[in-house]
C-alpha cells in the first residue's frame, strides 16, 4: 500500500515536471515579496545556479505586503520585505520568523530647477516642504541653506509616490524621526495620508511628473535618480554634515545605526558623520524552524553564500552592501536556522 | 426543378427529430448562462466577505467620509467615489459625441474606399496597452494640456468655477480625457455596427419623401438606432468606471473633492492598483476590498440606471411612432 502511494506520488511528480518542461530532479525554493531588491535577487539566483545546480529559486516580486502575507500563510519558502514586520504581523506567524537583512538603498530628493543645481537641504526644510509649510522656492529657509543657488520666486510642486512602496516607508520613517509634527499628523507607512502634493505611480511616475513640471520636487530611489541623470540634494545628517547619497554613505549609515538583535532596524537619521540620513535596508524573511530538512539546508547554504559572495555583487547593481560587522552578525543568525 | 425539390425533401427527412438533443442543448446553454450569473454573484460575495470587518467597523461612514489614512487606519471612500464618477462623466461627455459622429460618418457619409481603413485605425486605438497610453499621457498629453488648452479654459471659462486654481497638468480633467481616448474605440465600433444594421429601406423611404442627407440620418437612421446607440454608451461607461492604469498615471492621485477640474483627484480603481500590493495590516486590506465592492456596486448601479433609461427611451419612441 505504501509503495503504491509512493508510486502515485512519483508519477504525479513526473507528470508535473513534464508539464513544467524540465525533467531534472531539481529542487525549487519559492519566494515572494519586495520589488526594490528584485534585480539583485535575480542576479544572485542566477549566479547561485552555478554554485549549486541542484537548487533553483523562483522569486515573485509582488510587493512587501504580499511577501509578508505569503510567508505568514506559509505558501512560500521565504518572504521579502522593504520594511521590517510590525509586532502585530509578527505575532501572527506560526513559528519564529527571522529577519535577514540583505542590501540597502536610499531615497533622494530630486527636483526640476533651471540649471539643475545641487541643493543642500536639512531635516527641518524637508519636513516643512512635505508638510506644506514651504510653498515657494525662494523661501528664506531654502535661501539660507543655498546662498549661491538661483532660487526662483515660483510655486513648489511637491510630488510623492501614490503606490504603496518601500521607498515611501523609508521616506516617512525619516520624516517621523526628524519631525514630531510629521510623526503625530502623518506617521510611517508604505503609503500615508499626505498633507500636500501630487501622487505619481512608481519611481517612473514621480520622476516623469518632476521632469515635466518646472518647479517640482519629490523623492525617488537613488538608483533611479542616478540612472536617469536627475539632480539630487545633499542632505544634512544628524552629525551636522551635508552628505551626498551614495553607496558608501548608505553603508556608513548601516555601520553606525543601532541595530537590535532581531534585525528589525531602521537606519534613517543614523548618527555617523558620513551617513546619508534617508537610507533603508531590505530583508529576507525565513522561519527559524524549517519544516522540510532538504529545503532548509539549501536555504541556509544560499543565505550564507548571499551574505559572503552575494554582497560583492551589490555595488555593480547600485545597491549598498552590508558593512563587515553586520555581515558577521547576520551569518550568526543564519546559523541558528534549524532543519 | 425536381432535383432541388428532391434534395430539400431528403434533407427534411434525414435528421430524425431528437428530443434529447434539443433538451441537452437547452440545458447546456442554460448552464452557460447561469455560470456567468454565478460568476458575478461570486465576485460580489467574495468582495463582501473580504471586507466584512471593514464594513462592520466603518459602516456608512466609509461611503460618507473623506479621510484615507493607512497609518491611523481611518478609511473613507468619498473622494474616490467622487473621482470615479466625475472622471467617467467627463470621459462620456467627450467620447460620446465624437464616437457617434465618427460612426455616422463611417456608415452614412464616408466614401466606400475609406471606410475599412478608418475603422481599422480606430480599432487599433483599442489595442494600445493602458500603461503605454498612461506614459504617453505623462510625457506628451500633460505638458500639452498644461501649456495650451488649460490656460485657455482658465482665461475664458474660469468664471464657471470648473477651471480655476493652479494648473499642474495632472488633474481630474486629464484623467477624464485619457479615459475618453480609451472608450472611444468601443463606443465607435459598437455604434457603427448598430447604424449598419439599420435597414436600407428606412433610408430609401426617407429619401423618397424628399429628405436631405441630414434629415435621413436624423429621422430614419438615428431615431431607429437610438436604443442601440444608448446601449453602446452604457458599454463605454462600464469601461470608463473601471479604467485603472492610464488614469492612475495622469489624475494626480490625491484623495480630495474639488470643484475645479484642474485639481488632482483619485479613483476607486486607482487606489486599489496603487496600494493593494503593499498593504500589510488586515483592516487596510479589508478597506481596499471594500473599495472594490463599492466599485462593483457603482458599475451595477450604472447598468441598472442605463436599463431604466433604455425602457423610458423605448416608450417615448413608441408613442412618437403611434
Image (tube, coloured by chain):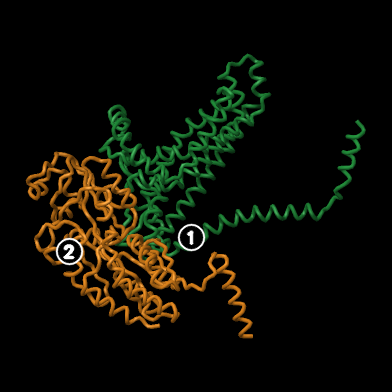
- Which label lies toward us, 1 or 2? 2
Left/right placement of residue B93 relative to residue B165 reads right
Q: Residue furthest front?
A: A50
Residue in the image at 63% along x and 14% along y:
B210
Q: Is residue A285 above or below residue A280?
A: below
Q: What shade has chain A been given? A: orange
Q: Which percent across, then down, holds residue A196?
A: 24, 49
Secondary structure at badge 1 equals helix
Instruction: Specify whether residue A138 is in view.
Output: yes
Task: Report crowding for label 1: few under 14, some 14 to 19, many 20 or more residues within 10 A (C-alpha).
Answer: some
The foreground one among B216 and A281 is: A281
Q: Secondary structure at mark 2?
A: loop
Q: Chain of mark 1?
A: B
Of the chain colours in the picture, the one used for chain B is green
Would you identify the image quadrant in which residue A281 lies?
bottom left
Vertical comparison of B80 with A328: above or below: above
Quadrant into which the N terminus of chain A falls: bottom right
Residue B29 location in percent, x, y?
Answer: 69, 52
**In the image, residue B48 lies at what x, y percent?**
48, 60
Residue B255 is at least partly visible in this image: no
- Mark 2 nearby-residue class (10 Å; few <14, some 14–19, many ≥20): many
Question: As rendered, which of A333 and B12 lies closer to the eye?
Answer: A333
Q: Chain of mark 2?
A: A
B185 relative to A313 in the view: left or right? right
Identify the residue shown where x is 37% and y is 83%.
A338
Compared to residue B258, the image places residue B192 above or below, namely above
Write down the residue under mark 2.
Answer: A269
In the image, taking residue B70 as reference, residue B269 lies left or right, namely: right
Q: Residue at x 23, y 75 (%)?
A: A260
Q: Give me the disc on residue A29.
A: none
Q: Which residue is mark 1?
A: B48
Q: Do pointers 1 and 2 mark residues of a single chain?
A: no
Amino acid at each position: 500500500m505504501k509503495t503504491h502511494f509512493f508510486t502515485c506520488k512519483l508519477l504525479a511528480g513526473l507528470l508535473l515536471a513534464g508539464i513544467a518542461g524540465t525533467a531534472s530532479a531539481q529542487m525549487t525554493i519559492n519566494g515572494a515579496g519586495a520589488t526594490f531588491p528584485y534585480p539583485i535577487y535575480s542576479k544572485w539566483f542566477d549566479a547561485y545556479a552555478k554554485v549549486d545546480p541542484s537548487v533553483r529559486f523562483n522569486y515573485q516580486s509582488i510587493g512587501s505586503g504580499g511577501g509578508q502575507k505569503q510567508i505568514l500563510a506559509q505558501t512560500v519558502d521565504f518572504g521579502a520585505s522593504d520594511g521590517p514586520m510590525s509586532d502585530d504581523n509578527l505575532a501572527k506567524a506560526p513559528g519564529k520568523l527571522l529577519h535577514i537583512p540583505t542590501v540597502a538603498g536610499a531615497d533622494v530628493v530630486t527636483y526640476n530647477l533651471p540649471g539643475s543645481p545641487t541643493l543642500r537641504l536639512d531635516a527641518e526644510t524637508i519636513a516643512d516642504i512635505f508638510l506644506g509649510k514651504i510653498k515657494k522656492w525662494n523661501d528664506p529657509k531654502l535661501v539660507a541653506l543655498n546662498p549661491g543657488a538661483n532660487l526662483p520666486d515660483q510655486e513648489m510642486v511637491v510630488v510623492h509616490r501614490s503606490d504603496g512602496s518601500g521607498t515611501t516607508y523609508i521616506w516617512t520613517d525619516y520624516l517621523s524621526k526628524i519631525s514630531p509634527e510629521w510623526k503625530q499628523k502623518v506617521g510611517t507607512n508604505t503609503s500615508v495620508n499626505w498633507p500636500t502634493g501630487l501622487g505619481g505611480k512608481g519611481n517612473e511616475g514621480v520622476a516623469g511628473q518632476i521632469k515635466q513640471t518646472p518647479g517640482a520636487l519629490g523623492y525617488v530611489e537613488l538608483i533611479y535618480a542616478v540612472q536617469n541623470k536627475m539632480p539630487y540634494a545633499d542632505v544634512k545628517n544628524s552629525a551636522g554634515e551635508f552628505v551626498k547619497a551614495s553607496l558608501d554613505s548608505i553603508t556608513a549609515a548601516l555601520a553606525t545605526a543601532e541595530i537590535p538583535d532581531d534585525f528589525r532596524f531602521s537606519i534613517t537619521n543614523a548618527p555617523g558623520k558620513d551617513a546619508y540620513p534617508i537610507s533603508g535596508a531590505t530583508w529576507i524573511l525565513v522561519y527559524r524552524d524549517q519544516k522540510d530538512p532538504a529545503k532548509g539546508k539549501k536555504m541556509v547554504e544560499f543565505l550564507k553564500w548571499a551574505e559572503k559572495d552575494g554582497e560583492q555583487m551589490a555595488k555593480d547593481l547600485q545597491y549598498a552592501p552590508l558593512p563587515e560587522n553586520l555581515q558577521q552578525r547576520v551569518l550568526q543568525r543564519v546559523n541558528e536556522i534549524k532543519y | 426543378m425536381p432535383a432541388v425539390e428532391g434534395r430539400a425533401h431528403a434533407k427534411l427527412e434525414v435528421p430524425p427529430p431528437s428530443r434529447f438533443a434539443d433538451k441537452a442543448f437547452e440545458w447546456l446553454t442554460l448552464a452557460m448562462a447561469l455560470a456567468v450569473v454565478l460568476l458575478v454573484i461570486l465576485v460580489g460575495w467574495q468582495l463582501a466577505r473580504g471586507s466584512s470587518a471593514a464594513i462592520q467597523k466603518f459602516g456608512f461612514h466609509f461611503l460618507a467620509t473623506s479621510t484615507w489614512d493607512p497609518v491611523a487606519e481611518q478609511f473613507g471612500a468619498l473622494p474616490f467615489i467622487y473621482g470615479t464618477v466625475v472622471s467617467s462623466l467627463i470621459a462620456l461627455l467627450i467620447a460620446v459625441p465624437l464616437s457617434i459622429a465618427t460612426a455616422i460618418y463611417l456608415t452614412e457619409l464616408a466614401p466606400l474606399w475609406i471606410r475599412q481603413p478608418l475603422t481599422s485605425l480606430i480599432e487599433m486605438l483599442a489595442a494600445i496597452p493602458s500603461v503605454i497610453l498612461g506614459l504617453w499621457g505623462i510625457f506628451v498629453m500633460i505638458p500639452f494640456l498644461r501649456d495650451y488648452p488649460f490656460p485657455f479654459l482658465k482665461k475664458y471659462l474660469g468664471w464657471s468655477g470648473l477651471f480655476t486654481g493652479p494648473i499642474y497638468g495632472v488633474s481630474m480633467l486629464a484623467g477624464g480625457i485619457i479615459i475618453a481616448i480609451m472608450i472611444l474605440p468601443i463606443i465607435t465600433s459598437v455604434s457603427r455596427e448598430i447604424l449598419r444594421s439599420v435597414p436600407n429601406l428606412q433610408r430609401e423611404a426617407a429619401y423618397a419623401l424628399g429628405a436631405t442627407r441630414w434629415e435621413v440620418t436624423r429621422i430614419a437612421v438615428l431615431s431607429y438606432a437610438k436604443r442601440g446607440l444608448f446601449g453602446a454608451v452604457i458599454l463605454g461607461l462600464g469601461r470608463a468606471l473601471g479604467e485603472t492604469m492610464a488614469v492612475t498615471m495622469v489624475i494626480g492621485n490625491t484623495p480630495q473633492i474639488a470643484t475645479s477640474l484642474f485639481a488632482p483627484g483619485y479613483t476607486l480603481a486607482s487606489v486599489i492598483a496603487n496600494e493593494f500590493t503593499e498593504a500589510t495590516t488586515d483592516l487596510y486590506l479589508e478597506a481596499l476590498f471594500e473599495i472594490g465592492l463599492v466599485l462593483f456596486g457603482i458599475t451595477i448601479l450604472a447598468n441598472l440606471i442605463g436599463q431604466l433609461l433604455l425602457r423610458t427611451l423605448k416608450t417615448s419612441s413608441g408613442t412618437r411612432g403611434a
